[in-house]
Amino acid sequence: MFGQRLRLARKRAGLSMRSLAEQMTPKVTAQAISKYEAGQMLPSSAVLVALGRALNVSLDFLMSGQVEALDGLEFRQHSKTSARDRAKAEAILIDNLERHLAIEQVLDMPASVDWIERRRYDSVASEAHIDDRADELRNAWHLGMDPIPSLCELLEQKGIKVVETDLPESINGLACHVLKGGEAVAEAVVVSTRINVERKRFTLAHELAHRIIRSTGNPAINLEKAMNRFAGAFLIPGQRLREEAGTDRHRVTYYEIVRLKHTFGVSAAAMLHRLGDVGVLPSNSVQRAFATFARSWRKTEPEPLLPHHGFANFEKPRRFKRLVSRAVGEGLISPVRAASLLDESLDSVERRIGGPTIQ
Protein backbone atom coordinates (compact mmCIF):
# COMPACT_ATOMS: atom_id res chain seq x y z
CA MET A 1 0.00 0.00 0.00
CA PHE A 2 2.74 2.49 0.98
CA GLY A 3 4.68 1.74 -2.20
CA GLN A 4 1.62 2.35 -4.40
CA ARG A 5 0.89 5.65 -2.66
CA LEU A 6 4.50 6.78 -2.95
CA ARG A 7 4.59 5.98 -6.68
CA LEU A 8 1.32 7.86 -7.25
CA ALA A 9 2.51 10.89 -5.28
CA ARG A 10 5.78 10.94 -7.22
CA LYS A 11 3.96 10.76 -10.58
CA ARG A 12 1.60 13.50 -9.40
CA ALA A 13 4.64 15.69 -8.70
CA GLY A 14 6.16 14.84 -12.08
CA LEU A 15 9.41 13.63 -10.52
CA SER A 16 11.69 10.78 -11.46
CA MET A 17 13.13 8.66 -8.66
CA ARG A 18 16.45 10.43 -9.10
CA SER A 19 14.85 13.89 -8.98
CA LEU A 20 12.94 13.00 -5.82
CA ALA A 21 16.09 11.62 -4.19
CA GLU A 22 17.91 14.88 -4.93
CA GLN A 23 15.21 16.87 -3.08
CA MET A 24 15.33 14.74 0.05
CA THR A 25 16.76 15.76 3.44
CA PRO A 26 17.96 13.43 4.91
CA LYS A 27 19.42 12.11 1.69
CA VAL A 28 18.33 8.80 0.19
CA THR A 29 19.25 7.16 -3.08
CA ALA A 30 17.08 6.58 -6.13
CA GLN A 31 17.63 2.88 -5.51
CA ALA A 32 16.12 3.21 -2.02
CA ILE A 33 13.05 4.97 -3.45
CA SER A 34 12.73 2.17 -5.99
CA LYS A 35 12.72 -0.36 -3.14
CA TYR A 36 10.13 1.70 -1.21
CA GLU A 37 7.82 1.70 -4.25
CA ALA A 38 8.33 -2.02 -4.86
CA GLY A 39 7.44 -2.82 -1.24
CA GLN A 40 10.90 -4.26 -0.57
CA MET A 41 11.79 -1.74 2.15
CA LEU A 42 10.08 0.82 4.41
CA PRO A 43 11.56 4.27 5.14
CA SER A 44 12.54 5.49 8.59
CA SER A 45 10.31 8.07 10.31
CA ALA A 46 12.63 10.90 9.29
CA VAL A 47 12.70 9.79 5.65
CA LEU A 48 8.90 9.37 5.65
CA VAL A 49 8.44 12.96 6.82
CA ALA A 50 10.93 14.14 4.18
CA LEU A 51 9.05 12.24 1.45
CA GLY A 52 5.79 13.90 2.45
CA ARG A 53 7.46 17.32 2.44
CA ALA A 54 9.17 16.80 -0.92
CA LEU A 55 5.99 15.47 -2.57
CA ASN A 56 3.62 17.91 -0.82
CA VAL A 57 1.34 15.16 0.51
CA SER A 58 0.23 14.30 4.02
CA LEU A 59 1.57 11.34 5.96
CA ASP A 60 -2.04 10.14 6.16
CA PHE A 61 -2.05 9.92 2.37
CA LEU A 62 1.16 7.89 2.30
CA MET A 63 0.36 5.55 5.17
CA SER A 64 -3.42 5.16 5.42
CA GLY A 65 -5.09 2.00 4.19
CA GLN A 66 -8.75 3.04 3.91
CA VAL A 67 -8.52 3.05 0.11
CA GLU A 68 -6.61 0.11 -1.33
CA ALA A 69 -7.12 1.06 -4.98
CA LEU A 70 -9.41 2.80 -7.45
CA ASP A 71 -10.99 0.52 -10.03
CA GLY A 72 -12.71 1.35 -13.30
CA LEU A 73 -11.44 4.91 -13.40
CA GLU A 74 -13.32 7.01 -15.98
CA PHE A 75 -12.04 10.51 -16.67
CA ARG A 76 -14.05 13.35 -18.19
CA GLN A 77 -11.05 15.07 -19.68
CA HIS A 78 -9.58 17.02 -22.57
CA SER A 79 -7.89 15.05 -25.33
CA LYS A 80 -4.42 16.28 -24.32
CA THR A 81 -4.59 15.40 -20.63
CA SER A 82 -1.14 14.35 -19.41
CA ALA A 83 -0.26 11.29 -17.33
CA ARG A 84 0.84 13.70 -14.60
CA ASP A 85 -2.58 15.39 -14.53
CA ARG A 86 -4.30 12.00 -14.33
CA ALA A 87 -2.03 10.96 -11.46
CA LYS A 88 -2.68 14.26 -9.70
CA ALA A 89 -6.45 13.81 -10.03
CA GLU A 90 -6.19 10.25 -8.74
CA ALA A 91 -4.12 11.34 -5.74
CA ILE A 92 -6.55 14.16 -4.92
CA LEU A 93 -9.44 11.71 -5.07
CA ILE A 94 -7.71 9.14 -2.84
CA ASP A 95 -6.91 11.84 -0.27
CA ASN A 96 -10.58 12.92 -0.17
CA LEU A 97 -11.89 9.36 -0.05
CA GLU A 98 -9.55 8.46 2.80
CA ARG A 99 -11.15 11.22 4.85
CA HIS A 100 -14.71 10.19 3.85
CA LEU A 101 -14.11 6.58 4.86
CA ALA A 102 -12.27 7.57 8.04
CA ILE A 103 -15.20 9.60 9.38
CA GLU A 104 -17.62 6.80 8.50
CA GLN A 105 -15.40 4.44 10.51
CA VAL A 106 -15.38 6.85 13.46
CA LEU A 107 -19.20 6.94 13.39
CA ASP A 108 -19.33 3.14 12.97
CA MET A 109 -21.59 3.51 9.96
CA PRO A 110 -22.72 0.39 8.07
CA ALA A 111 -21.67 -0.16 4.49
CA SER A 112 -23.74 1.78 1.97
CA VAL A 113 -26.47 -0.04 0.09
CA ASP A 114 -25.50 -0.45 -3.57
CA TRP A 115 -28.30 1.38 -5.36
CA ILE A 116 -26.67 0.96 -8.75
CA GLU A 117 -25.62 -2.69 -9.12
CA ARG A 118 -29.00 -3.94 -10.34
CA ARG A 119 -29.24 -1.02 -12.78
CA ARG A 120 -25.99 -1.66 -14.67
CA TYR A 121 -26.02 -2.57 -18.36
CA ASP A 122 -23.39 -4.00 -20.68
CA SER A 123 -25.09 -3.02 -23.94
CA VAL A 124 -27.56 -0.61 -25.51
CA ALA A 125 -29.49 -1.40 -28.67
CA SER A 126 -29.79 2.19 -29.91
CA GLU A 127 -29.45 5.81 -28.83
CA ALA A 128 -33.17 5.89 -28.04
CA HIS A 129 -32.58 2.86 -25.81
CA ILE A 130 -30.22 5.01 -23.72
CA ASP A 131 -33.14 7.36 -22.99
CA ASP A 132 -35.15 4.35 -21.81
CA ARG A 133 -32.35 3.41 -19.40
CA ALA A 134 -32.30 6.94 -17.96
CA ASP A 135 -36.09 6.88 -17.52
CA GLU A 136 -35.87 3.46 -15.85
CA LEU A 137 -33.35 4.80 -13.33
CA ARG A 138 -35.52 7.83 -12.61
CA ASN A 139 -38.50 5.53 -12.03
CA ALA A 140 -36.47 3.19 -9.80
CA TRP A 141 -35.36 6.17 -7.71
CA HIS A 142 -38.89 7.67 -7.66
CA LEU A 143 -37.78 10.96 -9.23
CA GLY A 144 -40.76 11.49 -11.51
CA MET A 145 -40.22 13.78 -14.48
CA ASP A 146 -39.45 17.03 -12.66
CA PRO A 147 -36.03 18.74 -12.75
CA ILE A 148 -33.59 17.38 -10.15
CA PRO A 149 -32.77 20.15 -7.61
CA SER A 150 -29.36 18.73 -6.66
CA LEU A 151 -27.41 15.94 -8.36
CA CYS A 152 -24.91 16.05 -5.49
CA GLU A 153 -27.59 15.42 -2.88
CA LEU A 154 -29.23 12.68 -4.97
CA LEU A 155 -25.99 10.77 -5.56
CA GLU A 156 -24.99 11.06 -1.91
CA GLN A 157 -28.40 9.68 -0.88
CA LYS A 158 -27.69 6.70 -3.13
CA GLY A 159 -24.42 5.90 -1.36
CA ILE A 160 -22.11 7.48 -3.95
CA LYS A 161 -19.22 9.50 -2.58
CA VAL A 162 -19.34 12.93 -4.25
CA VAL A 163 -16.20 15.04 -4.16
CA GLU A 164 -15.91 18.59 -5.45
CA THR A 165 -12.28 19.60 -5.59
CA ASP A 166 -9.63 21.53 -7.50
CA LEU A 167 -8.79 19.10 -10.30
CA PRO A 168 -6.14 19.80 -12.94
CA GLU A 169 -7.42 22.20 -15.59
CA SER A 170 -7.64 19.48 -18.25
CA ILE A 171 -10.02 17.29 -16.19
CA ASN A 172 -13.65 18.17 -15.41
CA GLY A 173 -14.58 15.02 -13.53
CA LEU A 174 -14.04 11.31 -12.96
CA ALA A 175 -15.77 8.25 -11.54
CA CYS A 176 -14.56 4.96 -10.07
CA HIS A 177 -15.10 2.04 -7.70
CA VAL A 178 -13.26 2.24 -4.36
CA LEU A 179 -11.54 -1.02 -3.41
CA LYS A 180 -10.54 -2.23 0.05
CA GLY A 181 -9.53 -5.77 0.87
CA GLY A 182 -9.95 -6.63 -2.78
CA GLU A 183 -13.66 -5.69 -2.75
CA ALA A 184 -15.57 -2.64 -3.91
CA VAL A 185 -16.64 -0.70 -0.80
CA ALA A 186 -17.96 2.46 -2.46
CA GLU A 187 -18.65 4.31 -5.69
CA ALA A 188 -17.14 7.76 -6.17
CA VAL A 189 -17.85 10.66 -8.50
CA VAL A 190 -15.62 13.73 -8.63
CA VAL A 191 -16.27 17.12 -10.18
CA SER A 192 -13.98 20.13 -10.59
CA THR A 193 -14.53 23.36 -8.65
CA ARG A 194 -13.47 25.33 -11.75
CA ILE A 195 -16.55 24.64 -13.87
CA ASN A 196 -19.89 26.46 -13.76
CA VAL A 197 -23.01 24.88 -12.28
CA GLU A 198 -24.43 23.95 -15.71
CA ARG A 199 -21.33 21.92 -16.58
CA LYS A 200 -21.08 20.58 -13.04
CA ARG A 201 -24.56 19.07 -13.19
CA PHE A 202 -23.94 17.58 -16.62
CA THR A 203 -20.56 16.20 -15.52
CA LEU A 204 -22.13 14.54 -12.46
CA ALA A 205 -24.83 12.99 -14.67
CA HIS A 206 -22.16 11.91 -17.18
CA GLU A 207 -20.13 10.22 -14.46
CA LEU A 208 -23.26 8.55 -13.11
CA ALA A 209 -23.78 7.21 -16.64
CA HIS A 210 -20.36 5.54 -16.48
CA ARG A 211 -21.51 3.69 -13.36
CA ILE A 212 -24.72 2.56 -15.12
CA ILE A 213 -23.61 1.70 -18.67
CA ARG A 214 -20.36 -0.25 -18.63
CA SER A 215 -20.25 -0.73 -22.41
CA THR A 216 -22.50 0.06 -25.34
CA GLY A 217 -21.88 -3.39 -26.85
CA ASN A 218 -22.48 -1.66 -30.16
CA PRO A 219 -19.60 -0.43 -32.38
CA ALA A 220 -21.96 2.09 -33.97
CA ILE A 221 -22.46 3.89 -30.63
CA ASN A 222 -19.44 5.70 -29.17
CA LEU A 223 -19.21 5.20 -25.39
CA GLU A 224 -18.61 8.86 -24.50
CA LYS A 225 -21.45 10.00 -26.74
CA ALA A 226 -23.65 7.40 -25.06
CA MET A 227 -22.67 8.85 -21.66
CA ASN A 228 -23.63 12.33 -22.85
CA ARG A 229 -26.94 11.03 -24.19
CA PHE A 230 -27.70 9.35 -20.84
CA ALA A 231 -26.74 12.51 -18.93
CA GLY A 232 -29.05 14.63 -21.07
CA ALA A 233 -31.89 12.14 -20.73
CA PHE A 234 -31.46 11.83 -16.95
CA LEU A 235 -31.42 15.60 -16.44
CA ILE A 236 -34.07 16.40 -19.08
CA PRO A 237 -36.66 13.63 -19.47
CA GLY A 238 -37.99 13.52 -23.01
CA GLN A 239 -41.64 13.37 -21.96
CA ARG A 240 -41.34 16.50 -19.81
CA LEU A 241 -39.35 18.38 -22.46
CA ARG A 242 -41.95 17.67 -25.15
CA GLU A 243 -44.65 18.93 -22.78
CA GLU A 244 -42.66 22.14 -22.25
CA ALA A 245 -41.53 22.78 -25.84
CA GLY A 246 -44.03 20.94 -28.03
CA THR A 247 -43.24 18.49 -30.83
CA ASP A 248 -42.19 18.71 -34.48
CA ARG A 249 -40.95 22.27 -34.19
CA HIS A 250 -38.97 23.81 -37.06
CA ARG A 251 -37.34 26.45 -34.87
CA VAL A 252 -37.05 27.23 -31.16
CA THR A 253 -36.35 30.82 -30.10
CA TYR A 254 -33.44 31.97 -27.99
CA TYR A 255 -35.88 32.98 -25.25
CA GLU A 256 -37.32 29.44 -25.12
CA ILE A 257 -33.89 27.81 -24.91
CA VAL A 258 -32.83 30.12 -22.07
CA ARG A 259 -36.07 29.46 -20.19
CA LEU A 260 -35.62 25.72 -20.58
CA LYS A 261 -31.97 25.76 -19.52
CA HIS A 262 -32.94 27.64 -16.36
CA THR A 263 -35.82 25.23 -15.74
CA PHE A 264 -33.66 22.11 -15.92
CA GLY A 265 -30.31 23.52 -14.76
CA VAL A 266 -28.27 22.66 -17.84
CA SER A 267 -26.22 24.54 -20.40
CA ALA A 268 -27.83 26.09 -23.47
CA ALA A 269 -25.74 23.78 -25.69
CA ALA A 270 -26.93 20.70 -23.78
CA MET A 271 -30.52 21.88 -24.08
CA LEU A 272 -30.18 22.44 -27.82
CA HIS A 273 -28.75 18.94 -28.26
CA ARG A 274 -31.56 17.50 -26.17
CA LEU A 275 -34.23 19.24 -28.26
CA GLY A 276 -32.81 17.36 -31.20
CA ASP A 277 -32.50 14.05 -29.32
CA VAL A 278 -36.19 13.92 -28.38
CA GLY A 279 -37.47 15.08 -31.76
CA VAL A 280 -38.65 18.56 -30.84
CA LEU A 281 -36.25 19.87 -33.49
CA PRO A 282 -34.98 18.07 -36.60
CA SER A 283 -31.24 17.36 -36.62
CA ASN A 284 -30.57 19.84 -39.44
CA SER A 285 -32.11 22.66 -37.35
CA VAL A 286 -29.81 21.78 -34.44
CA GLN A 287 -26.78 21.71 -36.74
CA ARG A 288 -27.78 25.05 -38.28
CA ALA A 289 -28.15 26.59 -34.83
CA PHE A 290 -24.63 25.51 -33.80
CA ALA A 291 -23.30 26.91 -37.08
CA THR A 292 -24.95 30.30 -36.52
CA PHE A 293 -26.32 31.92 -33.34
CA ALA A 294 -25.25 29.09 -31.01
CA ARG A 295 -21.70 28.83 -32.38
CA SER A 296 -20.10 30.21 -29.21
CA TRP A 297 -22.22 28.29 -26.70
CA ARG A 298 -19.77 25.43 -26.23
CA LYS A 299 -17.19 27.89 -24.90
CA THR A 300 -19.27 30.75 -23.47
CA GLU A 301 -22.48 30.10 -21.56
CA PRO A 302 -25.34 32.47 -22.49
CA GLU A 303 -27.25 33.88 -19.50
CA PRO A 304 -25.59 31.54 -16.99
CA LEU A 305 -27.21 30.36 -13.78
CA LEU A 306 -26.37 32.83 -11.02
CA PRO A 307 -24.00 31.81 -8.21
CA HIS A 308 -25.73 31.11 -4.86
CA HIS A 309 -29.18 31.09 -6.51
CA GLY A 310 -31.45 28.21 -7.47
CA PHE A 311 -29.55 25.17 -8.70
CA ALA A 312 -26.19 26.79 -7.91
CA ASN A 313 -27.16 27.13 -4.25
CA PHE A 314 -28.05 23.45 -3.88
CA GLU A 315 -25.47 21.79 -6.14
CA LYS A 316 -22.84 21.11 -3.49
CA PRO A 317 -21.76 17.87 -1.77
CA ARG A 318 -22.72 18.25 1.90
CA ARG A 319 -22.65 14.78 3.42
CA PHE A 320 -18.98 14.73 4.48
CA LYS A 321 -19.24 18.04 6.31
CA ARG A 322 -22.43 16.85 8.05
CA LEU A 323 -20.72 13.66 9.23
CA VAL A 324 -17.69 15.53 10.56
CA SER A 325 -19.94 17.96 12.45
CA ARG A 326 -21.87 15.02 13.89
CA ALA A 327 -18.67 13.32 15.06
CA VAL A 328 -17.53 16.52 16.79
CA GLY A 329 -20.96 17.01 18.37
CA GLU A 330 -20.91 13.46 19.76
CA GLY A 331 -17.39 13.93 21.14
CA LEU A 332 -15.90 11.27 18.90
CA ILE A 333 -13.28 13.56 17.38
CA SER A 334 -11.71 16.82 18.52
CA PRO A 335 -12.18 20.18 16.77
CA VAL A 336 -8.51 19.96 15.75
CA ARG A 337 -9.12 16.62 14.04
CA ALA A 338 -12.25 18.02 12.40
CA ALA A 339 -10.27 20.96 11.04
CA SER A 340 -7.72 18.55 9.59
CA LEU A 341 -10.41 16.38 7.96
CA LEU A 342 -12.23 19.37 6.48
CA ASP A 343 -9.01 21.18 5.53
CA GLU A 344 -10.35 24.28 7.27
CA SER A 345 -9.07 26.57 10.00
CA LEU A 346 -9.73 25.68 13.63
CA ASP A 347 -11.56 29.01 14.02
CA SER A 348 -14.09 28.13 11.32
CA VAL A 349 -14.73 24.71 12.89
CA GLU A 350 -15.19 26.22 16.35
CA ARG A 351 -17.66 28.76 14.92
CA ARG A 352 -19.60 25.86 13.42
CA ILE A 353 -19.64 24.14 16.82
CA GLY A 354 -20.59 27.07 19.03
CA GLY A 355 -22.14 29.53 16.61
CA PRO A 356 -21.09 33.17 16.10
CA THR A 357 -19.59 34.97 19.06
CA ILE A 358 -22.00 37.44 20.66
CA GLN A 359 -20.34 40.82 21.18
Image (tube, grey):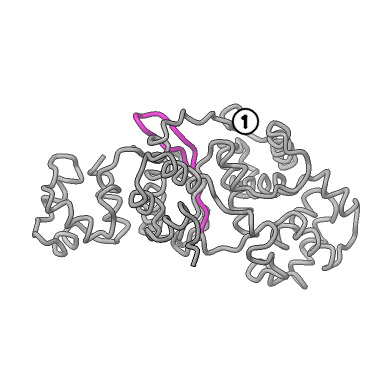
User: Which residue: 20% across, 46% down?
Assistant: 37
For the N terminus, which image quadrant? Answer: top left
Magenta region, mostly helix, strand or loop?
A: strand
Q: Position of residue 42 (x, y in %)?
A: 14, 43
User: Which residue: 74% across, 67% down?
Assistant: 290
Q: Position of residue 73 (x, y in %)?
A: 45, 44
Q: Is residue 108 left or right of residue 319?
A: left
Total count of labels: 1
- Circle 1 residue: 119
Q: Quadrant of residue 238?
A: top right
Q: Position of residue 301 (x, y in %)?
A: 67, 68
Three-letter amino acid code of the residue under disc 1: Arg
Classify 10 Å Cα crowding around label 1: few (below 14), some (14-19), many (20 and above).
Answer: some
Does residue 185 show up magenta in the picture? yes
Q: Is residue 27 left or right of residue 187?
A: left
Does residue 122 show up magenta in the picture? no
Q: Quadrant of residue 339?
A: bottom left
- Can residue 174 be seen? no
Q: Position of residue 14 (x, y in %)?
A: 29, 61
Region rendered in magenta = 174-192
